[in-house]
Amino acid sequence: MSEYALLELLGQVESAEAGETFRTFLRGAARDLILRVMSAEVEQLCGPAWHPDKSGGYSRAGSAPGSVIHEGRHEALKRPRVRKVKGCDKGTGACEEVVLSSYTAAREPGELHAMLLRSLIGGVSTRNQQRVHPKSPKASKSSVSRLFAEEGARLFDKFRERSIQRDDWLILMLDGVRLAEGLWAIVALGVAEDGTKHMLDFEVGASENTQVCAALTARLIERGFAPKQECRLFCAFDGSKALKNAAKKQWSDAIFQRCLVHKERNLRQYLPRRDWGEIAGLMRRIRKAQGADAGRKALENLRAFVASRNAQALASIDEAGEDLIALHLLEVPNTLHVSLLSTNLIENSIRNIRGKTGRVTRWRAETDQPQRWLSMALTEIERGFRRIGGYRDLSALASALKKEKKREEKAPKSATHHPAHVDSRLFCGM
C-alpha cells in the first residue's frame, strides 16, 4: 500500500481504527525495508539476478519461511537463501548455506528481551507474559524464566562488582528480610554526607544471626566502605544484637541509635491499650527534643511513666538506655530526627523488596536464585531513592562524629625533675 492509499484509507475509518491501520502500515513498511536490505546483501554476494557473479563462490538458493523482530513482535516473511559454491562436495551436491548478516541482525532479540524484563520487573508474572506480548513466541513461561536466570546472574555480578568507595559515608543501616522459612537476607544501606542513599550489599543466610551479619560487614570493608576520614560511623538499628555486634566488630567506635518506632511497638506489648496514647505522646517528645539535656529529660519522663505501669516495660527501656537518644547526645539539629531516630529508611526498602519478590512462591537456597532476585530488587529500588529529610544538616552530623584527638603528653625538659640528671657535684664532700 502506498502512502497516498494510506491517507485515503485513514480518512474513511474511525479514529480508533486509524491508529491500528497506521501501525499496520508501518510494520509492513519495516518488513519491506528489511527485505530490501537482505536483497542488497544477496546481490553483493552473488551479483545481480540477471548476471550472477560466479567468481565470488556464492549462488542463490531460493527462499524459505522466516521471521524478524520489530517493535517486540515477530513478523513473518520469506527470507532469501544463499549457498557457498566453493568447497562443495561435488559427489553429493552438499553445499554450506550462508547465514545473511542482515537477517541475523533483524532477528536480534535485544529490545524484545528488554521489554520482557521490564514487564517482569513491573509485576507481570512469567505465566502472564504471553498475554502482555501475544505476538512473541519468546514470551512463554519457560523462555522468560530462562531469560531472567541469565539476566539475573548478570545483574548479581554487576551489583557486587560496582564500587562503593566514597570519602563521605556517615550512616549505615542494617536490617533483615525474611524470604522463606529458614531463609533470610541481611541488607545494608548507606547514607553519604550529601544525603544520598545507596544499597550497599546483602548477605543470604538461614537466619538473622551474627555469622551472616559479620559476613556482610566484612565484605563491606573488603569492597572499600569506610566512614568519612577522622569520623565515627553512625548506625541506626532495630535492636538486633547480631546486627549491632557485627557492626561494632568492624567499627568499634561507631555511634548506635536505637529505632524509636521498634521500641514503641515493643513497649505496647507490655502495656494495656489505654496507655498507648500516652506512650505515643512521650515518644513524640523524644523525637522533638533538641540536644542532650532535652533528650535525657524526655527519656526520663518516658521511664517514669513506664515504671508505674509495668516492670518488663521498664526493663525494656533500661536495656536500650541512652541508645534511644544517641543522636540527641551528638547535639545535632532536630531536623535530622525524622530520618535518623528510626530505621524507616531501610524498612521502606525492605517493604519494596517484598513487593518485588512477592511473586516468588518457591525459594531455592541451594542455587543463586535468591541472589538474582535480590540484585534485581535492590537495583530497581535504588532508582527511586531521594535524599533523606534534613540532609542539609548532615554537615553538622559530620562535625559531631569527628573523633577527638588524644593530647600527647610531653616529657619534662627540666633536668631537675629526673633523678638521672641530678648534678653529681652536689654530693661532693659528703
Image (cartoon, rainbow, N blue to C red):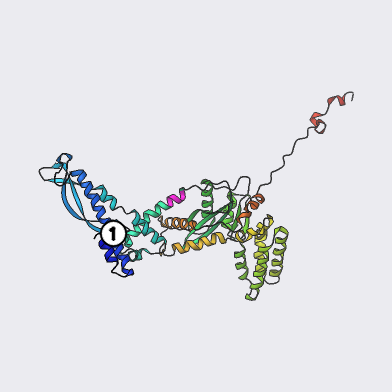
Main SS class of the magenta portion in the image: helix
Three-letter amino acid code of the residue under disc 1: Arg
**Residue 430 in picture, x, y percent from top left:** 89, 25
**Residue 286 in picture, x, y percent from top left:** 67, 64
Query: Is residue 83 left or right of 250 when viewed as pictured?
Result: left
For residue 57, which quarter of the picture?
Answer: top left
* Quadrant for the N terminus in the image: bottom left
In this view, the residue in front, 39 or 327, is: 39
Query: Is residue 118 left or right of 298 when viewed as pictured?
Result: left
- Determine if residue 181 is in view: no
Q: Which element is circle 1 on? A: helix
- Crowd band around label 1 with a 10 angstrom C-alpha radius: few (<14), some (14–19), many (20+): some
**Residue 45 in picture, x, y percent from top left:** 20, 43
In this view, the residue in front, 17 or 241, is: 17
Which residue is farthest left? 91
Count of marks overlaid on the render? 1
What residue span does the magenta drawing correspond to?
156-160
Q: Is residue 19 magenta?
A: no
- Determine if residue 273 is in view: yes
Q: Residue at x 66, y 65 (%)?
A: 315
* Depicted 267 relative to depicted 416: above or below: below
The residue to which callout 1 is attached is 27
**Residue 310 in picture, x, y percent from top left:** 67, 71
